Amino acid sequence: MYFVNVAGNGAILMIVILDPRLHSPMYFFLGNLACLDICYSTVTVPKMLENFLSTSKAISFLGCITQLHFFHFLGSTEALLLTVMAFDRFMAICKPLHYPFIMNRQVCIQMALTIWAIPFLHALLHSIMTSRLNFCGSNHIHHFFCDVKPLLELACGNTELNRWLLNTLTGTIAIGLFFLTFLSYFYIIAHLFLKTRSCSMLHKALSTCASHFMVVVIFYAPVLYIYISPASGSSLEEDRIIAVMYTVVTPALNPLIYTLRNKEVRGAFNRKIRIQL
């Protein structure tokens, strides 16, 4: 699955960069998503694969906190990026005349920088607060990577603030971004059914958004279950199983979804293959 992730997302990233026909806001953000998915899986999967072959299955404290930081950093970045991609589709479909002026190159770059900067600070809060806890008991993490929940189970002392930050702050951000993404698609669908009289145009617009909406659903479903449910609402065993979905499966599925459902990406990929042959 990791190989499929790196190869598939790497191919999409290469095509978006090399093909001038894909130099548009939609594919600019798709390239960001491809790069993000490679990094997101790389934070957890290589270490997990190493542990399969190792007898010690150990990680240093600094390595653990670093892994926690980049996991939350890249996870929050993906949630924010999916929201921006939904907004981009909203502007392209509902405001087509204003779209080239609003979503110009400079704005897209500024949005991309914001997408990567804000989650870094959010993740830094979790990593600092977790690193300040005292760990005086067992050092056996009941997970395949370092996350806040399993580390809080090992901490001694009061962890109420850490749990509040995880459930309230992270939960509010996740729900807020999911709501904005859903709102964008609600307006898109309402606009299409009210303003579009052509069935072919309606089908084309909906199929353009379908790939992105599928990615949103398979990303948010496990995340909302783990981080929005109460502390006692799910076991660490369930969390491990569900975490495989958004750390391994979802990043590997994204390039398949976009490639199979997007004619422009398939066309660009076929052109590059023919040139190489």
Image: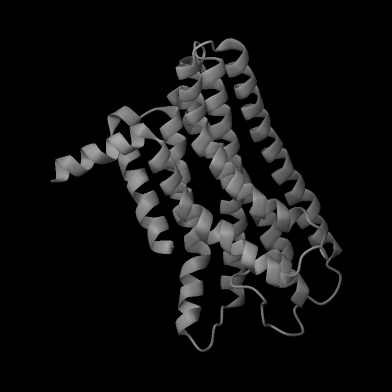
Left or right of 97 on screen, residue 64: right
Name the spot of residue 172 as percent of width and height, x first.
Answer: 76, 45
For this view, does 180 lie left or right of residue 276? right
Q: Quadrant of residue 236?
A: bottom right
Q: Position of residue 69 (x, y in %)?
A: 61, 60
> Is residue 127 or residue 51 the one in the foreground?
51
Residue at the limit of the structure toward the front, as seen here = 199
- Does residue 167 show up? yes
Q: Seen in the image, is 158 located left or right of residue 21?
A: right
Look at the image and tell me whether residue 115 can be seen: no
* Quadrant containing the N terminus in the rendered view: bottom left
For the point 53% across and 27% down, the residue is 88
User: Which of the two residues, 234 or 133, is positioned nearer the viewer here?
Assistant: 234
Residue at horizontal 58 percent and vertical 78 percent from the top:
60
Quick check: 264 left or right of 131? left
| Whether residue 141 is situated above or below residue 265 in the rendered picture | below
Give above or below for 190 relative to 109: above
